[in-house]
Amino acid sequence: MKSFVHFNTRSVDEAIHLLKKYEGKAKINAGGTDLLGVLKDRILPEYPEAIINIKTIPGLSMIEDGEEKILIGALTTLADIINSSLIEKTFPLLKEAALSVASPQIRNVATIGGNLCQDTRCWYYRYPDGIGGRINCFRKGGKTCPAVSGENQYHAVIGAKKCYAVCPSDLAVALTALGANLTIAGQKGVRTIPVEEFYHPLGNTLSPDEMITAIHIPKPFPVARQTFHKFTLRKPIDFAVVSVSSLIFLDQEICTSSRIVLGAVASAPFRAYKAEEFLKEKKLSAKTAEEAARLALDGSKPLAKNAYKVEIAKTLVKRAVQGTE
Amino acid sequence: MTSIPKKHPPHTLSLTVNGETHSFILGKGPNEVSPSHTLAQTLREKLGLTGTKISCDRGACGSCTVLLNGKAVFSCMLLTVECEGKEITTIEGLSDPKTGNLDPLQQSFIDHTAFQCGFCTPGIIMSTKALLNTNPSPTVDEVKEALSGNFCRCISHYHVLDAVMDVVKKEGNQ
Amino acid sequence: MTDYRFIGKSTPRKDARDIVTGKIKFINDVTIPNMLYGKVLRSPFPHALIKNIDTAEAMRIPGVEAVLTHKDVPEWMGGASPLHVRILDNKVRYVGDGVALVAAETEDICEEALRLIRVEYEPLPAVYDVEEALQPEAPRLYDMFPGNLMPPENRIFGPHTLQEVVIGDVDKGLEEADFIIEGYCTYENIPNPMPPEPPGVIAAWEGSDTLTVWSASQGPHMFKVALQKRMGSINLQSIGSPVGASYGSKFMSWQYVLPAAALAKATGRPVKFCYGKAEHLAAFTVRLGSRIYGKVGMKKDGTVTFVSGDWLVNTGAFSETAQAMVAVGCGEAQLMLRCRNWNLKPKVVCTNRTASGQIRGFGGQELKCALTPIITMGMEKAGLDPVDFFKKNYVKPGEDFYWRDGIRWVCRGIDFSAAIDRGAETFGWKEKWKGWLIPTSVKGAKRRGVGVGVHGNADVGEDVSEAFVRLDPNGTATIYSGLAEHGTGQRSSICKMVAEILQLPLERVSVTPTDSRVNPFELGPVGSRGTYAIGSAVIAAAEDAKRQLFERMAQKFNVLPEELETKDGTVYVKGRTETKIPWIKGMGYDSTCMGHGRFEPDFSQPNFMMIFTEVEVDTGTGKVELIRVVGATDVGQVIDPLSLTNQLNGCLGSAGIDSALFEETVFDTRLGRIMNPNMIDYKWRTFSELPEMEHVILETPFPSHRFHAIGVGEITPSPGPSAVLMAVSNAIGVRMNDYPLTPDKVLRALKKIATTKRRGKR
Ligand SMILES: Cc1cc2nc3c(=O)[nH]c(=O)nc-3n(C[C@@H](O)[C@@H](O)[C@H](O)COP(=O)(O)OP(=O)(O)OC[C@H]3O[C@@H](n4cnc5c(N)ncnc54)[C@H](O)[C@@H]3O)c2cc1C
Ligand code: FES
Ligand code: FES
């Protein structure tokens, strides 16, 4: 790996100060399970000059129970989330999502903040520099997205325009379904933003001098049925081909309201509003599930090689609504 | 706002590996540890602990698994400079340093020929060790889960599971 | 059955302790003093001329010792026969092809230097499809291969090297057939064997005429022979390291060894050259592409009346062994199908994708994976149970076939019908097989199906092996063999064979390092030749040494040498164990007995592997899960039970069964790039997804060697892929023949999503 200046930071302020100082030429390192791959393959148009380790900042790794919400520090590892009985009890879908990520060794160091901020896994974007040089795709400032007429089996099926890469984060999907908010600290102070609004087509809304410090998740009330289904070609390690996180509020058999979010179908977790709307006050049956699935994917425009993702997404929505495996 | 500490980066680094502490000079020279070196690189190139293997070098295969404060981690995805003050255990640290006696897991891998080419073996043993440290009597499914990040192309998985479950049984845990 | 002291018993591998303690040194674990590192600048274009290269800036970086381009590399040639690939050329032929070489003090410096080399290319049109490459107007990769067609090889396996199967009269077969099936199938998903250890080498020169190469070659001695052919008559010492698996791919890899040697020569220092994983996956070797347009005639009773067709083999930019693989594949087809009339014509074609290598299954798997689905259509038409069909048609003692040498061999091995029956019974085939395109069971969206495949190879007795066994007076034996350890446990197994013959404790038998200056000729553990070919040479050497020992000891007892017996380093007269004399008493401290053994090729005893598979298809998502695998074989005599089951379990990986399920190299034909050169996007099986696995291993003595055993390791994956196609077809009721069966394809077959055009031009 090409060298850089390295800082172990002791506070959020210090980290932000450094980010500011390097004017976009520094990168935060949390668990490093994403960043190190990005650096080794030299996929960034500009290699960072400085790496800022934030693991040395005290207090950012914690799970705190509040009355209406639970607070998770940005440095909390996925393993800690999985092992937390509080999370298991309150947000089983978040636990499932965390458990579906990579492998135990990665989850031991990977942080929730890093998971939300990880770079896309589009294989054109990630093409290693060492084998003939990186591919200058749209996301890297090139003119077009090579996936559109290329190998797009894992690419977006909904709403993509210039770049067809999907958001790879499993936790983003789960947190969107849970209606979570992010606390972001920056040069200008602290702001809060729903996870749902965090992503834009070419990444996220962080400015170069900002970092996530915490995630707040409201406790669902009344208690909802939570599911997280992730379809992969094989169980561990794989990123989602498609995933569905759902929160279904039930009164007897009747759905009072719901949040259904699809992962890996678009550049951000995709809220299936039409399906949510449709399910309101409906009795959950095979038929309503079928219709909800259709509506969830309504408007999808698959590319030549990823129509199957739409079909799988429908199946997952159907299964989530029906509560079957 | 805190000011940025004046001297960055620190000029030396100490690492505790298999109970021994080693000091390095940070820098770009051939004998120094660079801030961009991964733990796997440092273990192999600076400490000669080549039992830790590098295969994918991207966090996808588990060949480089070591224990960091008792937990299984990928040493190819950790910066050496960020491992200061942590306890690192590699495959070389499993057997008794004085007597040379093998860890029961190692012996069981021998008894079951739980490898073919053996390239993946140190990583697999370290992942298993991490599991048994926290859960001495795992089920087969728990072992599979703990090893789900370890690549073995020869398909020695079945013998590995036999070897691990045999240790679990022998240690009287199940 | 004989009860042996070691043979057939599980004994720890000799290298086991080093493996589990991390002490074993794979090639990249070795450093030698004063060593430099080497790296390659790789082409961004699939096909281009290099107009200009400027290396001045790269040379200026401190720590850079050499930068080589096509202008200054030695004229050592690689590639197939005729040799046609330079180490670096003024033309690149795939993305990742070598453009320049750098040697520097560290790998990081190499990488920085590579980035400073300025290259001007003139891109040329590229071609990836075999049929397109054969068109007259297609871009041509090598001037010497018009139409991108590699010439048939007529030397590698002797003057009659098998390059097609043309036997009998196909017209007659057409007349005799009750059914005629015409079909098309490809096995072109380019699976990668992907051993965990990336390829690597260290090269060092002494003076200008002596080169030492340390490498993870699967056959270090043969590698020496091959390198000498490429480099001229230099003194070459080839030293093998333990192989971090190979599955064939690291048998002979001049692609990285010649560059390392060139850099070592240019710098006068040892150079280590180890690939990273991306290079390993995108710029080393993959499986040959295989495409068949075939026609088969069949009678109602399963008799095959003819097989004809075109077999199009895609080598990518080159293949060192494609023609040899075609030869073996052509032989193997005949083992599987008893048929009098053949007209199977291969064409070996170069294209602008990554080069191909030899991979477990060596031509046979590539051929079978495309041919079997076509044969299967015939079985389906005739309403035959595939197990019965394979049992009827697999070669039996007394039947003949043309092997890779083009010579007619008569099988003098054994009949595998018993193994087939036992395999079917263990799997529960009769209960699970419901007929063609009928699922075994349906539960909601989940449908199960079963399939079976078969494979065999007469290579258990291929090529020459030589060995020495030296007895030392202290009661130890040393085997001199160039046998590399690549995971099969074969180095330990030959110790068992020698220990058995000399009745020595296993600890007292050892093998020399795989060093070509120490050991006699050894082709290497390829095919499944370890047990029979290599084993026979070692056994003969041990017998020879024992004979010499008895000759020397006979006078001590005043008997004929034949009357003696040895055990645990002592000698006694047969039946009279009360007087035992240690070897040293007869030999003195100042002598050794050196036995010599040589194995001459024998293709008369094919091995056999049948794979039964059960899959479950989720029709909602198109996902195929492998539920159960049963392997059936007969090995004559088990040498080491655990090593054998390890090899049999290996059927899943190394571009085997899983190449029908999810393994594929994804290739963008606009860019000529491999999109998944990493271990996340290239899919492989994990601990979480292990199918139930069972093996039926029979031991019907073979007329092979002293222990009546033959090897089987190489072929275990090969019957699997077509078995999986059959199982999935049956599960979903639609014939599937497009590897791998990803959700996309399954959902298309189920008509849940619209179908698009398939590959293939005709
Ligand atoms: C083999 C493999 C498989 C994987 N599988 C999955 C999977 O299935 N699902 C999935 O979701 N992910 C997967 N991942 C991605 C994995 O890296 C993330 O899940 C992990 O959580 C990232 O966390 P980290 O702390 O290691 O991030 P880092 O690598 O440290 O950081 C990632 C990015 O986020 C930035 N960053 C980190 N923390 C912050 C912060 N607090 N504020 C602002 N920016 C920040 C960094 O600058 C960097 O750009 C996989 C990765 C690998 C290597
Ligand atoms: S080498 Fe570290 S995970 Fe593969
Ligand atoms: S034993 Fe070879 S990869 Fe596991």
Image: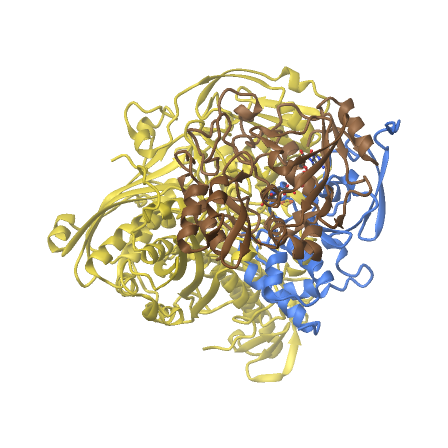
Quadrant location of residue C84?
top left
Q: Which chain is blue?
A: B
Residue at 79% across, 27% down: A18
* Figure check: A151 above or below C625: above
Give x and y (percent) for residue A131.
Answer: 54, 30
* Figure check: C425 above or below C713: below
Quadrant location of residue A190?
top right
Chain C drawn colour:
yellow
Question: How is the protein colored in the picture?
Answer: by chain
Ligand 1 placement by image quarter:
top right
Q: Which chain is brown?
A: A
* Figure check: A147 above or below C409: above
Left-right relation of A145 to B31: left
User: Is residue C40 at least partly visible in the picture?
Assistant: yes
Left-right relation of A118 to A159: right
Nearest the eye: C333 or A240: A240
Nearest the eye: C41 or A210: A210
Locate the N terminus of chain A by quadrant.
top right
Residue sitting at the far left: C175
Give x and y (percent) for residue C548.
Answer: 56, 66
Give x and y (percent) for residue B166.
Answer: 64, 70
Quadrant location of residue A35?
top right
Nearest the eye: C167 or C656: C656
Residue at 32% across, 51% down: C331
User: Is residue C742 at least partly visible in the picture?
Assistant: no
Nearest the eye: A264 or C51: A264
Counting labels gives: 0
Left-right relation of A213 to C678: right
* Figure check: C410 above or below C218: below
Give x and y (percent) for residue B151.
Answer: 58, 51
